[in-house]
Amino acid sequence: MTPMLPSWWRWLAVVLLGGVLAGFFALRGGKHDEGVIIDYQEPPKPLAGFTSPKIAKRLSDQKEARIPQELSAKVTAQSMEETRRKLTEEREFVRTLQTEPARELLSRLLTLWSEPGVGSRASEEKALVTMVLTQALHSSDENSNGPVYQQLSALLGSDALPLATKMEIASILGSVQTPQSVQLILGAYQQASDDKLREILGNQAGRTGDNLWAGRFHEDLSPPLEAAWPLAKDNSKLAQALANGLAKVGTPTGVQLLVNEILHSAQTIQDLSDLKDLRGQAAFLALNKVRNPNAVSIFANGLLNADSSELERYVCGLSLAAMGKAEATQVLLRWAATASDQETPWAEQWFGKMRDAASFDLVGASLSPANGVKFASATIQSAVVAGQKNRER
């Protein structure tokens, strides 16, 4: 049996072991930073005047990035200042030009046209002079501008003038859009022997009616076009140019001429898809360009007159639908009130073309229970209602 140590001996052993451990840690006292943190230590400070390579590169990159930005801002400011200066000079130049009569403006253009080469400055000056000349030909009376038109006509007929210059003159006349300019274009067209010049003049004739200067339709442009209409019998391009001009000017006489040409060229609605007559085809294609409210009476008569043929009623109704005017839509509503079921495809097509707010309001009021239109045909009424859906598109 193993002998038991006395209790005092066990206490002595514990005391001795504690002393040994205390001595061991005392010997390790100067080495606490090797794994055991005794207290907070302040991080080392960098040496004065020293920058790490990474920081130095980042600062250099930032400086290099700022240099283009600063240069760009400087260039932009200079560019804006240059633009302002240029605009100021142009305004002053235009004010000077506006004090000159049309004949002096044309003299300026002749000088610019005669200069060899085309510099950017000369091109800008020529554009400004051309603009002011167009305005002068609008505002001055026929007598004062007569010599100018005569000079332009002579220039178009001159063999010494380059084609490029003649094209510029034709463009000026196409922009002016006075009876004198339209007559000059059409006269030069008949006399021109150069096919390219004839094409340019024909295109300028087709611009007639595009420029609503002074905010109105210039119905005095229609007579020269009407007078030239017989010349287009065998010329599809001229026929289309004249028809477009007549439609855009939109006088009652000019529009009636186009309608009559279609009725002369076709017998049925089906014939419209394959018109052989050049002027009839041009007239049919041009009628959707009519916007002048004064033409509504011609279409209304063709649509509502009991003696009108089916072809005339269809052509006039289609033209009214293309106008986008409340006056035209009012006529279509008058027709729809008595139209039969068989004419439903027309109603669907015509009211399906509605696009102006005034027409939508008009049709909406006509469908209201209080003061609505009484339709003879329920299917026609449905077609009119369906047209209102365009308002949501």
Image (cartoon, helix red, strand yellow):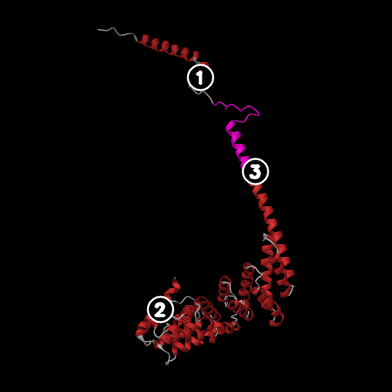
Residue stretch rendered in magenta on the structure? 40-67
Q: Distance of mark 1 from mark 3, alpha carbons?
A: 53 Å
Residue nearest the observer in this picture, 220 or 196: 196
In x, y percent, where is residue 315? 44, 83
Which callout, 1 or 2, points at the residue further toward the start of the chain?
1
Q: Which mark is residue 32?
A: 1
Q: Give the camera-side residue of 365 and 80.
A: 80
Q: Earlier in the sequence, mark 1 or mark 3?
A: 1
Gap between marks 3 and 2, in whole Å? 70 Å
Residue 119: x and y, percent?
68, 60
Quarter holding residue 242: bottom right
Residue at point 39% right, 83% down?
A: 269
Closer to the camera in the image, 290 or 353: 290
Q: Amino acid at mark 3?
A: Ile
Q: Which comes sooner in the sequence, label 3 or label 2?
A: 3
- Foreground mark, 1 or 3, reads 3
203 in relation to 254, above or below: above
Residue 250, disc: none
| Residue 143, image x, y percentages | 71, 82
In front: mark 1 or mark 2? 2
Which amino acid is tagged 1? Answer: His
Q: At numbered mark 1, what does the secondary structure look like: helix, strand or loop?
A: loop
Q: Is residue 227 left or right of residue 124?
A: left
Q: Tell me the residue that label 2 is attached to.
A: 274
* Residue 53 in magenta stretch: yes
Mark 1 Cα within 10 Å, few/some/many (few <14, many 20+)?
few
Q: Amino acid at mark 2?
A: Asp
The quarter of the image holding the N terminus is top left
Which residue of the protein is positioned furthest toward the bottom in this rendering? 307
Relative image position of residue 106 (x, y in whole percent): 70, 72
Residue position marked by numbered label 3 in the rendering: 67
Q: Secondary structure at mark 2?
A: helix
